[in-house]
Amino acid sequence: MAVDATLPPATGVSLVRLPPEVDLASAPALRDEMLAALNRDGVHLVADALDVTFMDSSGINALVRARERAAGLGGSLHVVTRSSAVRRVLQITGLVERLRGGRFARGGLRLPPAARDRPHV
């Protein structure tokens, strides 16, 4: 599995790139990496789902856990995707409403203040 955690786009912001398929096989490692990134890099997490073509309930669970951790730290989760299928899964499960301000975007997104001065995804 290729979870690519890169340097954060700004102080207090973590960036994690999701693999093309987020399923039972890849979700546990993804969840662990997102939680570690929040602990290591900052309380705001940008989940780069631009390459995601498939996400099952295991992937949703990983995002929910990351969102809960971020919220507990006073931060937020932001999902960036181009995929209408991923957006639909996020909408059907209600995760869009649980994201701070319902933020997910098609390749672009309004980031928290700590990240606004630097490019994001």
Image (tube, helix red, strand yellow):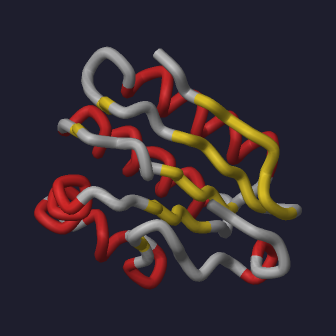
Q: Residue at x 78, y 59 (%)?
A: 9
Q: Residue at x 55, y 27 (%)?
A: 3
Across and down, in percent, residue 109 comes to 54, 76
The total number of labels drawn is 0
Please identify the quarter of the rendering in which residue 17 is found.
top right
Q: Nearer the viewer, residue 105 or 75?
A: 105
Residue 88, relative to residue 97: is it above or below?
above
Across and down, in percent, residue 119 comes to 75, 69
Q: Nearer the viewer, residue 51 or 10?
A: 51
Across and down, in percent, residue 98 comes to 35, 70
- Residue farthest to the right, as pictured: 11
Across and down, in percent, residue 18 comes to 47, 38
In which quadrant is the C terminus drawn?
bottom right
Residue 79, relative to residue 54: is it above or below?
below
Residue 19, relative to residue 87: is it above or below?
above
Q: Residue at x 17, y 55 (%)?
A: 85
